[in-house]
Amino acid sequence: MLELAILGFLAEGPLPGHELRRRITHLTGYSRPVSDGTLYPAINRLTKAGLIERRPAPEAGGGRYVLNLTAAGREDMLRRLREPAQYEITDFSRWFVILAFLSLLPDSAEQHAVLRRRLDFLEAPASFFYDGDTPLRAEQLTDPYRRGMLLTARAISRAERAWLHEVLDGDGIRGADEQPRPQTHTRDRKD
């Protein structure tokens, strides 16, 4: 996912290495900090593969450079966005990296195909805890901390599924000041 983040940020424009590191750190947050020892080997791999190039930046001082995305790098980034591995769809942190750059895919049908894969994953019955092969629900647990895990995961999943349905149903792109239309979810109502 580090390589996709590098390619994605460079697709938005050339960047020096320190700025690229700052943006990736903001994207991945405290849970997955990016060190120079991780970032610069990835930059070197992508440079050797011809996906990015270094251009001297004399205006920034001696020995400084700016990273640029190549045409091959753009194609590789688009392929990674079109065809994420299943673990990239199911892992929350990896999914957020995909989501951060999904708008770079020029075809909304391709974007929606990726979103549908995530929605299919979220709508499948799952739990952190099982009785045999049967997923346990929060209401079935007596341990308050495990129950808290499931309640938190349920709330996040509901919010994400609602957003995915909004986008896939065609009304998910709104201005910042517009409010969503009220929706009823029979599945979540208690009668």
Image (spheres, rainbow, N blue to C red):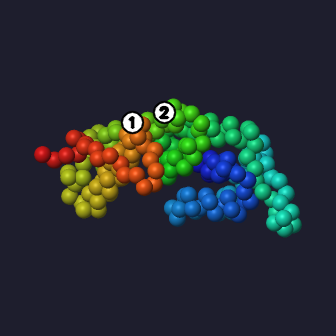
> Of the residues tagged 2 and 1, which is closer to the observer?
1
**In the rendered image, is residue 63 in sight?**
no
In which quadrant of the rendered view does residue 183 lie?
top left
Q: Are marks 2 and 1 in contact (CB under 8 Å)?
A: no
In which quadrant of the rendered view does residue 90 lie?
top left
Q: Name the residue under label 1.
A: 169
Whole-angstrom CA distance, mark 2 to mark 1, is 13 Å
Q: How crowded is mark 2: few (under 14 residues within 10 Å), some or many (20 or more)?
A: some
- Closer-to-camera residue (54/42): 54
Residue type indicated by callout 2: Ala
In the image, 188: left or right of 107?
Answer: left
Q: Position of residue 127 (x, y in %)?
A: 32, 47
Q: Which residue is drawn at 25% across and 43% down?
A: 184
Residue type indicated by callout 1: Asp
In the image, 168: left or right of 5?
Answer: left
Q: Position of residue 30 (x, y in %)?
A: 52, 64
Q: Sequence-wise, which precedes: disc 2 or disc 1?
A: 2
Q: Position of residue 155 (x, y in %)?
A: 32, 53
What is the secondary structure assignment of the residue under circle 1? loop
Q: In this view, does 163 lie above or below 145?
A: above
Q: How crowded is mark 1: few (under 14 residues within 10 Å), some or many (20 or more)?
A: few
Q: Name the residue under label 2.
A: 113
**In the rendered image, is residue 4 in sight?**
yes
Number of numbered callouts drawn: 2
Q: Residue at x 75, y 50 (%)?
A: 68
